[in-house]
Amino acid sequence: MDRQTDFLLNISVLYRSTQKYYDRMLQSIQLTYAQLPILIMIFEQEGITMRQIAESGVYDKGTISKNVKHLEQEGYILIQPSKQDKRNKELYTTDYAKQNMSKVYAVRRDWWQHLIQSIDQKQFEQFVGSYEIMAKNARQYEQSSPNEITFFDWKKVSLEHYPNQLSTVLYMGGSNFRSPFDTHPELVFIKESLEALDLDKICTYLNKRKEVLQAVCFEGGEPFMSDLLPSFLSYTKKLGYLNKVKTNGCFPGMMKDMIDQGLIDFVELQIMNSPRLYAKSIGMNSFDITPVEQSLDILKTSAIDYQCTLVLVKEYHSLSAVETIAKWLSGIKKLVVYTDIESCHTIESHLHNVEIDQLEKMMDILNKTLSYVEFRGAPC
């Protein structure tokens, strides 16, 4: 587990441990950890409004209302109309609250002193400073909405990804599959530390190389999961590029819209297995194959160039499965079959290539059933 993942896990442990400690120590005065920050804010800023609490503590209205109501019922606060604006309610602590605040502060201080023991002053100051910056960033980002597409890997030049075209390949993160033989696990299990590539640099590169490169390929992950993909496809088309998208076929509607708008020139549809074995091959217990079949039908009936791909894995593809796949894909333009999974880093380790004698039989079945089949080595 990487340090960033450990950090978030430690935050979770710290939060849950703090909650348990406060709940236990404050039980005698009918307070819980959830009410504590709100009560302290009211005590230290008499007359504060619920809106101000929400803005300072990033609480939603429901959480504040629930805890304010509890504090009022337990006799800790009074709610009064604002003299400046009758629509606003101001919050004040009662005498009962004031009599108990010393205990609240003592509990908080004891817990804090326990947490920072054996941490020297310099380490402590660095941590507090970093944590304050992270909290500020969290507040700002929580209120924003992403407006830039993100890419996490980039192959600047490729002769393989777009047939007969020199291309650049951009990799997007996130997938609705967890295929054991996925060759980009880092784009499925996205770590907190995974930084997006600089979009300005990508755009600069695309502008400078538009006289040399002919195509931009989008892979993942699953590109069609991003609502921001269409606008970037439009951008690359305006630069004069051909666009290719590799998809698992689960988003036929979006794919068709992009085809109809002329934003995509080539589609690569990855076929995982025969319909009956699809769920196992994508890491699920069950799966509705309908969207994939719809994607197949769209590609078969449209004028767009496309190909289907199939990665053969000994543990997941039997001879009978390949026979079913061949019949299922009957009528497609082209199938590319990858046979060397052992050379790739996959989600599930220790996968094996189909043995030669079985592979030859599979190749024979596919060649006899489909109009054009191309066999390649590793899919990575």
Image (cartoon, rainbow, N blue to C red):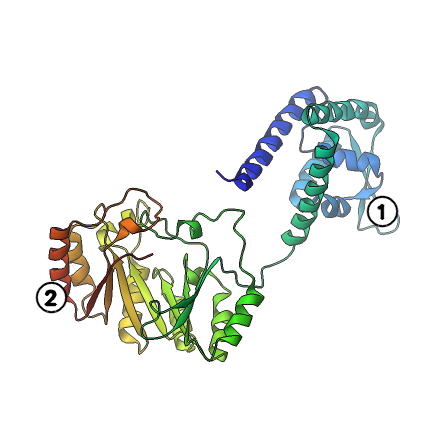
Q: Which class describes the residues within 10 Å of circle 2: few (<14), some (14-19), or many (20+)? A: few
Residue 105's label in the rendered image is none
Estimate the x, y position of residue 207 in percent, counting from the top left: 53, 75
Q: Residue at x 34, y 51 (%)?
A: 182
Give the residue at the far right of this rendering. Answer: 83
Give the residue at the far top of this rendering. Answer: 28
Q: Quadrant of residue 48?
A: top right
Which SS class for mark 2?
helix
Residue position for label 1: 82
Q: Is residue 311 left or right of residue 263?
A: left
Q: Amino acid at mark 1?
A: Ser
Q: Residue at x 72, y 46 (%)?
A: 54
Q: Residue at x 38, y 62 (%)?
A: 251
| Residue 30 in view here | no
Q: Is residue 155 left or right of residue 125?
A: left
Estimate the x, y position of residue 116 in percent, counting from the top left: 70, 27
Relative height, residue 26 to residue 297 (above, below): above
Label 2, label 1: how far apart the Cα atoms are = 82 Å
Residue position for label 2: 368
Q: Amino acid at mark 2?
A: Lys
Relative height, residue 369 to residue 47 (above, below): below
Foreground disc of the pair 2, 1: 2
Relative height, residue 204 to residue 339 (above, below): below
Estimate the x, y position of residue 186 in percent, counting from the top left: 43, 50
Q: Is residue 132 left or right of residue 213?
A: right
Q: Quadrant of residue 263?
A: bottom left
Give the mark, 2 or 1, whose residue is nearer the N terminus.
1
Which SS class for mark 1?
loop
| Residue 195 in view here | yes
Quadrant location, the C terminus: bottom left
